[in-house]
Each structure stands twice: as C-alpha cells, then as structure tokens.
Image (spheres, rainbow, N blue to C red):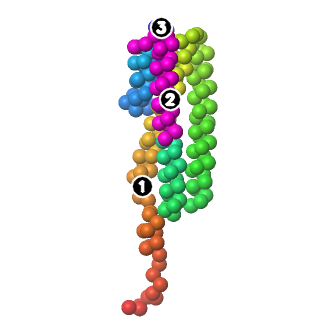
Amino acid sequence: MKRISLFIAAAATLSFPIAASERVHYAAANACIAENSGAESVDCLMAIADATEAERLALEETFLARAQARLDANDIGETHHGIAVADMRSAAQAFKDYAEHQCEAEVGLSGAVASGSGQIHWSCKIRLIDDRNAHLRALLARDAMRPVATPASTATSSPSTTSPGSP
C-alpha cells in the first residue's frame, strides 16, 4: 500500500500545472484510498470518476452552447463556429483516448495488481479529468468576460438610411 501511495504522489507531480484547490475530485480520491481498502476503494474511486466525467461532459456542452450563442448573436461567423464545434468534439475524444492510455501506462509502470492497479488507474483518470475540467472552467470564464452582441443590439446598429445633412 505504501508503494501505491508513493507512486500516486509522484504521478501527481507529473501532471499539468493546476492548483491543488482545483483538483476537488482528486482530493476526494485520495481520501477514498485512505479510508477504504481493496475493492471498496476501487468502487469509491469509480463513483468519483463518474462524477468527474459528468462534469467534463457538462463543461464541454457549455462550450458548444456558448459557440452556438455567439453564432446566433453574429459574434462569430459560420466558419469560426464550425471550427469551435468540430475541434471541441475532436479534443474531447482525443482527451478520452489520451487519459485511458496514460492511466494504463501508469498502471503498467507501477507493476500493481488487483485493487492496487484499480486505485492507480482511477486516481489517474480523476486527476487528468480534474485538470481538463479546470482548463475548461478557465476557458469559459475568460470567454464570459467578452461582451457578446445580442441579436437585438445587432439589429439596431445598422446604418441609417437618411443621407448626410437631412433633418
């Protein structure tokens, strides 16, 4: 068990530079391992991973909705909307693939078996998804600060039909 804890602590230092306070689920995962043993810890980690994954999916959907809102407000054109949507979907799938392979690589390197391999795999997934979620939250927060034209305000900003010098 000590070997697994040391491995998890070392693996945490290799991830993206995300503040520990932004890894809410990863902190819960560590508590899960500390408070449970064997299969119970893996079940606990899987439940946390499901919640973390649900948050990731919701953030990605929020991004897609934001892109649609910007298109509807004529804040971005069809081309940029298409890029945003296609590349977010592509990034989401690439992230899922990356996380799966990265976490399996960490299990392989650890040599852990049985519940120990599950603890490493699910802790890794939670850490990586927490990092992705922090990135998406920051992206959405930055975008929220940008003013968005509303369809009503774009309609009122059309040029005047009166000629210069007319009353």
Task: Give the SS element for disc 1.
Answer: loop
Q: CA distance from mark 3 to mark 2?
A: 24 Å
Q: Residues within 10 Å of mark 2 (few under 14, many from 20)?
A: few
Q: How many marks?
A: 3
Helix, strand, or loop for circle 2? helix
Which residue is rendered at x = 42% and y = 68% of the image? 153
Residue type at mark 3: give it.
Met
Give the label, 3 or 2, closer to the camera. 2
Lower position in the chain sequence, tag 1 or tag 3: 3
Q: Identify which amino acid the numbered label 2 is placed on.
A: Asp
Q: Residue at x 47, y 14 (%)?
A: 40
Residue 19 visible from this viewpoint: no
Q: Which residues are magenta?
A: 35-58
The residue that appears at 42% across and 55% down in the rendered structure is: 146
Which residue is disc 3 drawn over?
1
Report if residue 50 lies within the magenta region.
yes
Q: Which mark is residue 146?
A: 1
